[in-house]
Amino acid sequence: MQVELTVNGKSRSDDVEPRLLLVHYLREVCGLRAANVGCDTTSCGACTVLLNGSSVKSCTVLTVQTAGQEVTTAEGLAADGELHPVQAAFRAEHGLQCGFCTPGMVMAAVGLLSENPHPTETEVREGLEGNFCRCTGYHNIVRAVLAAADAGHIEPAEVRS
Amino acid sequence: MSILGTRVLRSEDPKFLTTGGVYTEDVVDERLNGACHVFFVRSPAAHARIQSVDVSPALQAPGVVAAFTAADISELALARPMPGMNKQMTRPLLASGKVRYVGDPVAIVVTEQPYQGEDAVELVQVDYEALPAVIDFADALSDEVLLYEDAGTNVAVTFGDASALDEHLFDECEVVTSRTILNQRVAPAPMETRAAAASWGEDGRLTAWIPNQGAQGTQRGLARMLGLPVEQVRVITPDVGGAFGAKFGTDPEHALVAWVARQLGRPARWTETRYENLIAMTHGRAQQQTVTIGGRRDGTVLAYRLEVVQDSGSSPRIGAILPTLTILMTVGPYTIPKAEAVACSIVTSTTPVGAYRGAGRPEATAAIERAMDLFAAEIGMDPAEVRRRNLLAPFTEPHRTAFGALYDSGDYVAALDKVLAAAGYDQLRKEQAERRASGDTVQLGIGLASYVEITGAGDGEDAPPKENATVEVHPDGTATILTGTSPHGQGHATAWAMLASEELGIPVDKITLKWGDTDLIPEGGGTGGSRSLQHGGSAVRQASQELIEVARERAASELEASPADLRFSAERSAFEVAGDPDASVPLASLAEDERLVVRTVFTQPGATFPFGSHVAVVEVDTETGKVVLRRVVTVDDAGFVLNPLLAEGQRHGGIAQGAAQAFLEEVVYDADGNPLTASFADYPFLSATEVPSFELADMQTPTSYNPLGAKGIGEAGTIGATPAVQNAVVDALAHLGVRHIDMPASPQRVWQAIRTAAGSGGSSPWASTAKENA
Amino acid sequence: MIPAPFDYVAADSPQHAVDLLERHADDDAKLLAGGHSLLPMMKLRLATPSVLIDIGRLSELRGIRADGDEIVIGAATPHAVLAGSDLVRAEAPLLAHSAAQVGDPQIRHRGTIGGSLAHADPAADLPMALLALGGTVDVLGVDGSRGIAADDFFTGFFETSLEPGELIASVRIPRSPGAAWGYQKFVRRANDWAIVGAAAIGGRIALANMGPTPLRARAAERALAEGASPAEAAELAAEGTEPGEDVHADREYRRHLARVLVRRALENRT
């Protein structure tokens, strides 16, 4: 069936199976492969993107559910070749090693900071409880998110009801 | 200003942060156009005879291209056990006759589109005749039910002679204590699951994209399994989303994907699901250990014995030989007059066991560190003091242990003192005492671990470890390095560039690293066993230095001077005539007429032995048994630190995995061999809320074995953290009479230990759980 | 890892959804709101509906408002909205807190109260919270609307008293500003379901994962009503429960946890 949505600011219209998961739509149909599939049980968050500005696990959203809505992926964060403040902070703090969890982690962090611009360390850890990393032990990821919060450039989002 | 030892940000990161890494499933290549998708039908039974396999219903499903069973692949080589194993324990790449673990691949279904595969796989009909599962250590050792009838036993191999143990080993000891403890099975669970993509050229060559830890080893494995000369196989390593030891070599699935592509005359791709990953990627650890320790009441340890049963899973792979490393490191950093160790590896109807961060050494450290604490409790001495009294004195000349390990350099007492100071040990004990006195529901536990571990080993004394590197300087002032290492998060692109930059004077961001393509780099040892910096980094440095010497000759003729009169200025990346800086020639220009490239092999005399000490602080809720990890303070001394940012990252990741084993993660099977932790919802994978930020202290005791003075850091954090956290949990409850809690210290296990110690628990319910966890 | 094939239709209104359910009465049709109870099951092929009827964006099913002495919450209201609602935090803070415990932030952006209640996982947060608060589930069906009291809603393991063809339209919770409440969710790891959970408010005590449905700890409630202290009442927390066994806990440990958690909940702790 036909579905129309906006991905990283660009309108799209595609014919998809109802069961096509948003993560596979982004990767295979849109060619945006930063979001990764890391599990079967909505646990790991490697697929995290923003849907209307809120972080969601795109492996548990059907593409057809996003009709008329806006999806932002990691590829859509950087503007004019400059890293988004959260991306820059991840680099500065060595918050990534193998990189597989990273796009999802960054999107979750962007979502977190848009709702809570000045989190404590505990709030950062709880805010990222839906994103697994096997390489970093989370230590530098937490530092990166706190550093990005200090830099203070994150746009607040409304939680749409 | 030297760049070595500075916190250089990774050049890899912009790509990973914006468009993302290109992992095997992401690879877009014209050689893979039109690829079909491979799916595996896997056994739902732990141990059963295969009566029949009927793929015909699947062949009717939409998009199914083909389906194959063991009969179709009979020309492929068997998956051989490693040398030294019981040779009857061979098996074909697809199960035939019998399945031996839940997840054993039985058949293959190939589809046009990925979504069709899951639909089709469900339609394959396999008839199984169930056999009793073999899960428990005791059951396997009894040989009542054999996994391989022709082998006549479930023992794959033994190390040492259990009948020759010295019954007088502990005669002089005033105090002896013994315990059988579990180093439980865990899942490596890298964030990227296994995958493969294969394409055959018209020239009959195979090109395979596989996430791995060493393309050359994977290439050789593929060649052997497919019956091909090595030159006919090319392995390309895309970005790898973590490995931790479980992506070494070649898995049956890799070879089968390649075979399917050849059979169907079109490229083939495969990505496993997380479920498959948790049941069919090799597991880690899985040792049952009996530790016996004895000594004098003044804290001197006089004797130690370690008896290991290694669960190898359904077929003896790397896991079966890891006990040799455990035995090698039996006494750890201690001086113990009498020590002995034996091991045997058994097969069970569970997932095969392979290498997992530390691979045999964490098990040795966990055993002796638990034994040290048991001994300390027995004599009523502080665990730090017991350790201090038994640690080897500092040494700079290599020290050989009774088990044949040659420790290159170490100062174990300094590491212990340093970490105790950093942790504020005395203050922690004071706080613990206060909470005990006031009967707080939440008690404080302080756990220690001192460790030494082996990194960068070769293949024995006759085959010392080595690695190659090729460095080339281009006329445009950039440089390229080819390495035999295989990074998957460790940051070699930045680290090796730093080493080359130091010698060549070329900026890091103008240096490109290549790895993992066997056409480009036919030889290499890969990345694992914490070898890369000491071998691979040393090779890069050596190649860079040799390149300068080659360039010097060209510069001499260019400047019409003798080579001895030339000085290379790294600041300018140019040769100068000594005393006449205006007479100079840039390094890059010397590549204009003829390529400026050097390949070298660096050989190291032997393995190196990093060491350290960890302190873990936990809080235990004595009503619920819940453990909260509050602090982990570490000294991890791996000699020279090239890039502190990267080294700290390795320590953080290792500490987290080590701690996770101690109090959170475990693979569980029920009595029928069904895996109960086969998803990230069930397998207690560590999240950010379960660990604190870590406190790392710096200590660098160089090795003389390579010019950098570097040992390996990658696994050290894991090795120290597991026993530190386990000891902390037991320590929290020591005043209640608890002497030991098996890992992981789950809430129920902790609660049960408290009850048992209090005498109200009755007989332990853990007999049945130990059976399930084996 | 991916669902079996199905047909999908988006409903225009709650009534339209009811009509669609009726039209597909012989198919295996399911309602889809946030999809974070249903889609995980479908991805594991534990559920294989042939039709999904999407009600996730119907404005009639969203929103939170006060209505007399109750708060009315649209069934398709995501947990994050519930957790962040000033009205709910003021008037029924136990519910806001419960919604904030579900899964993780991404899950809370999608999962809805209606979906969670209809899914009826005995280990989940919102079913336990509803039972403790004693709310009402407003249901729309072919024969019109009806309200189901919380105590009558959960009937079995992942089963509710919803009839085929009915959808949850809203949930009504008594307003109780200032009432003391306690909530305990015992987990091994942050985004797990409760190994055991306890919620207490106004003399009602509800338990999660102590049986096939969320349960009232009635023996403990009676003791409390008769003047027992929290500690004394909590001793009876496990009575009438049928806890299961799994990798995290056996029955005996679950009973123990129930007693500890009920005591802590009665001490108004979160």
Image: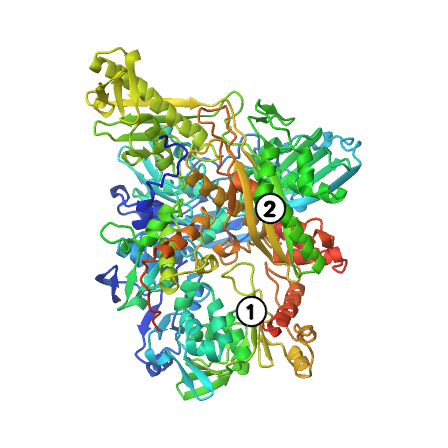
Secondary structure of the residue carrying numbered label 2: loop
- Residue at (66% x, 77% y) in the render: C220
Q: Are marks 1 and 2 on the same chain?
A: no
Q: Is residue C35 visible?
A: no
Viewer can see residue B378 = yes
Q: Which residue is mark 1?
A: C270
Q: Quadrant of the N terminus of chain B?
A: top left
Which residue type carries mark 2? Gly
Q: Quadrant of residue C141?
A: bottom left
Mark 2: give few (<14), some (14-19) or many (20+) Cα within 10 Å: few
Percent coordinates x, y for residue B316 in the rendering: 55, 38
Q: Nearer the viewer, mark 1 or mark 2?
A: 2
**Circle 1/circle 2 CB separation < 8 Å:** no
Q: Is residue B667 toward the left or the right of residue C67 in the image?
A: right
Residue B134 position in % (x across, y down): 62, 48
| Residue type beneath disc 1 | Thr
Most extreme residue toward the top is B562
* Mark 1: secondary structure: loop
Give coordinates of residue B521: x percent, y percent. Answer: 34, 29
Residue B30's image quarter?
A: top left
Q: Quadrant of residue B263?
A: top left
**Residue depicted at x 43% and y 36%:** B76
Task: Name the residue beneath numbered marker 2.
Answer: B424
Is residue B605 positioned above or below A68 on the image?
above
**Chain letter of disc 2 in the image:** B
The chain to which mark 1 is attached is C
Q: Residue furthest front?
A: B579
Frontmost residue, C191 versus B613: B613
Residue C53 location (% of width, % of height): 35, 74
Q: Is residue B445 left or right of residue B609?
A: right
In the rendered view, does B169 fall on the left or right side of C174?
A: right
